[in-house]
Amino acid sequence: MANRIPPLMKQLPEGGTYARPVRIESLIDACDNLPFETLIDRARLKDRRNPNYLPSEVLVFFLRVTRTDNSDRRFAILYDLVMNRLTRSLRSAVQGNTENARQSELHERMIERFVILLMKDRGAYCEALDIFEIAFDRAARSLKVDMLRVMGRRVPPAISLTEQETGEVRQDAEAALIDLNPMSKPIELQVTYRIQLRRAIDSLPDNERRVIDMIFAGIPAQSDDTGKASIAQLLHCDPKTVRNRRDSAVKKLIRMLGGETQDDA
């Protein structure tokens, strides 16, 4: 097997690291020198019985390695293909939920979670994506378990969430978000604070929770680059709406976590 294919990095509980199945490694190696257009032609095949069909695990590998590209073109094309594969896989993963509204929310949260992991991986290697290069469909089912756990542990908000933010963007919003980020806390406080922050974020209205999660994942509110995902694009709203939701969420989180906002000073 060619050494140029980077190994996975996530650690196994018993020691060592995750490893791709031999078949997946072989396909990656065989496709590594293909012209990109040829790779995409094969990636678009949907019939798994076709000898040229590429498993989703292979597509995730090639999507992730685009982080080193000078252009986002390859990322944009592979991103669409992988998201189509994920949507099909999740369609079966959410079957069996009787409430349509809950089923819809579950599906949205699973897609969101994958996108957030992917955007993190664009900035720095995200080990949580390794499983998608090993067993894509099983990883999709694991998303269901994780998101059902999140949906089940919602707690009533510590403050009233009825206030609607309709004014201009607050000047202290960016600084407040930096302070809210768990990594801004001393290491001895990070574990407890992460739990408190996660519960506070989960209690926000969904439209605000999504914005905060994506900001912490490093996804920009808007982007002039059509190949780079932005919060406005992913949530199908304009950048000002994203900023308003952010500001409203920040004020609520600061109050829930015992801080102050400029309006309270």
Image (cartoon, rainbow, N blue to C red):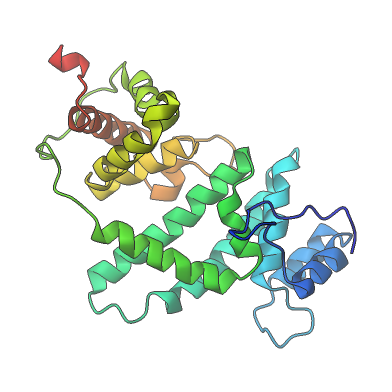
Q: Is residue 124 visible?
A: yes
Residue lying furthest front: 14
> Toward the viewer: 37 or 52?
52
Give the quarter of the image for residue 49.
bottom right
What residue do we see at 73% from left, 73% from top? 54
Q: Position of residue 199 (x, y in %)?
A: 26, 45
Task: Please state, as top left, top right, bottom left or bottom right, where the N terminus lies in the image.
Answer: bottom right
Q: Would residue 133 appear left or right of 92 to someone viewing this image?
A: right
Q: Is residue 181 visible?
A: no
What residue do we see at 83% from left, 70% from top? 26
Task: Please state, as top left, top right, bottom left or bottom right, where the C terminus lies in the image.
Answer: top left
Q: Position of residue 264 (x, y in %)?
A: 14, 16
> Toward the viewer: 133 or 245?
133
Q: Would residue 112 appear left or right of 104 to someone viewing this image?
A: right
Count of numbered circles on the image: 0
What residue do we see at 66% from left, 60% from top? 60
State whether residue 263 is above or below residue 211: above
Give the quarter of the image for residue 96.
bottom left
What residue do we see at 38% from left, 37% from top? 191
State whether residue 41 is above or below residue 77: below
Residue lying furthest top: 265
State whether residue 72 is above or below residue 15: above
Q: Would residue 23 appear left or right of 148 to someone viewing this image?
A: right
Q: Would residue 150 appear left or right of 91 to someone viewing this image?
A: left
State whether residue 72 is above or below residue 239: below
Give the quarter of the image for residue 185.
top left
Q: Position of residue 171 (x, y in %)?
A: 31, 16
